[in-house]
Amino acid sequence: MNILIINGPNLNLLGTREPEIYGSQTMDACLSELKSKHANGNIDFYQSNIEGEIINRLQQDNYDALVINPGAYTHYSYAIADCLKNISKPKIEIHISNIYKREEFRKKSVTAEQCDAVLSGFGMSGYHLAIQFILKQIQE
C-alpha cells in the first residue's frame, strides 16, 4: 500500500514554527517514526508552499491512499477541494492544532467535505492515527 502524505504552506517549518501550537517535532522525525511503525505501508511525503504544485502532486496516480494537511489552504482553496473531489482513494485531512480552538477564519475547512475523515488537534500523532485508520479500513 502506497500512502501519500501532503503538507501545505509553512509546514516545512515544523519543529521551529510556533512550537506552542505545533510542537517541536520536525516532519523528518515524524516521518521516520511513521515509516518504522507502519512498515507494511510505503509512505511517500510531499510538501509545498504553492497551491498549484500541491494540485499537480495530487493528480499523480501513484498512491493508494492520502493523508493531507492543507495548512492555510484548508480555509480557502476551492482548487484543492475540487481536486480532492475527483480522487476516489481513501483520504484523510489532518490538522496538528485544534482548528476549532483558534481564530475564527481557521474554523472553516473547504477541503474537509471532500475527505473521508478529519483529525484535528492530535498534534503530530494525527499523521499516525490517519495512517492507522487507512490501513485498518483496507484490511476490512
Image (cartoon, grey):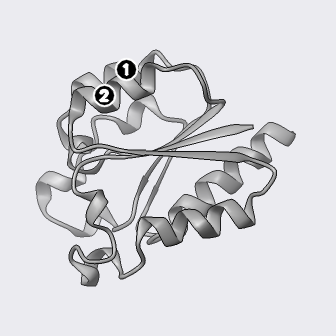
Mark 2 lies on residue? 80
76 left or right of 130 in image: left
138 left or right of 29 in image: right
* Residue at image coords 35%, 22%: 56
* Residue at image coords 30%, 59%: 12
Please state the horizontal and vertical placement of residue 2, each as a whole percent of the image.
Answer: 68, 37
- For badge 1, the amino acid type reads Cys
Q: Quadrant of residue 19?
A: bottom left
Q: Quadrant of residue 91?
A: top right
Q: Residues within 10 Å of mark 1 (few under 14, many from 20)?
A: some
Q: Is residue 44 above or below residue 15?
A: above
Image quadrant occupied by the N terminus = top right
> Which of 60/117 is in front?
60
Q: Residue furthest top?
A: 86
76 left or right of 138 in image: left
* Residue at image coords 26%, 84%: 20
Mark 1 lies on residue? 83
Q: Quadrant of residue 49?
A: top left
Please state the horizontal and vertical placement of residue 48, each as a whole percent of the image.
Answer: 29, 43
- Per the model, the C-alpha gap separating discs 1 and 2 is 5 Å
Dot 1 falls on a residue whose secondary structure is helix
> Which of 28/126 is in front?
28
